[in-house]
Image (cartoon, grey):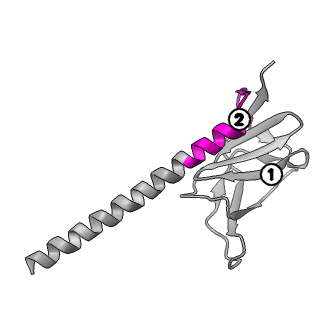
Amino acid sequence: MRAGLVLAAAALVAGCTSTERAASDTRARGERELAAATKGRVAGPPQRCIDPQQSSGPQLIAPDALVYRDAGTTWVTRVEGCPFINRDQIVIAEVFGGQLCRNDRFRTVQRGGAAIPGPFCRYGNFTPYRRER
């Protein structure tokens, strides 16, 4: 009986370790993708809102960043209130007043899967990255 409990505990710890490793790998990949998206650019002061009509995107960068691009500027926002996003998802944004702003809500839907949206997420501030001069 005791040996069975020890084996069950070991399996649980091993499962947590592999989950933690996968999350760590995903975060590291996301930071590499974010570095590539902002390479050669300098961060400006964060802005509260952006105009989605002037922007392409979003590009989802796991686990917690969205990138929008417009003429010469790459905008990065860190997602708040979402446990995890990935690039296989589609963003469904709620736009009020023609702008995307900090604390506006959005959801994601898995691409090619069931159309059941995930939890509500919120945009953080939008940091502009522009080419160095």
Question: Dot 2: what SS?
Answer: loop
In magenta segment, residue 36 = yes
Residue 21 placement (x, y as % from top left): 41, 55
What segment is highlighted magenta in the picture?
A: 29-48
Within 10 Å of the Cα at label 2, are there few (<14), some (14-19), or many (20+) other Cα atoms?
some
Residue 32 placement (x, y as % from top left): 60, 42
Within 10 Å of the Cα at label 1, are there few (<14), some (14-19), or many (20+) other Cα atoms?
few
Residue 128 placement (x, y as % from top left): 75, 33
Q: Is residue 42 above or below residue 125?
A: above
In magenta segment, residue 30 = yes
**Type of the residue with mark 2:** Thr
Nearer to me, 84 or 27:
27
Q: Is residue 77 above or below residue 57?
A: above
Question: Dot 1: what SS?
Answer: strand
Q: Which numbered tag is attached to residue 39?
A: none
Q: Which numbered tag is attached to residue 38?
A: 2
Q: Residue at x 34, y 66 (%)?
A: 15
Quarter location, residue 40: top right
Where does label 1 land, which residue? 57
Q: Is residue 51 left or right of residue 45?
A: right
Nearer to me, 65 or 125:
65
Q: Residue at x 80, y 51 (%)?
A: 57
Quarter location, residue 89: bottom right
Residue 56 placement (x, y as % from top left): 85, 49
Instruction: Looking at this view, name the residue that lies furthest to the top.
Output: 133
Please identify the quadrant where the N terminus is shown.
bottom left
- Residue 79 visible, this angle: no
Q: Is residue 24 above or below residue 94?
A: above
**Type of the residue with mark 1:** Gly
Please identify the quadrant where the C terminus is shown.
top right
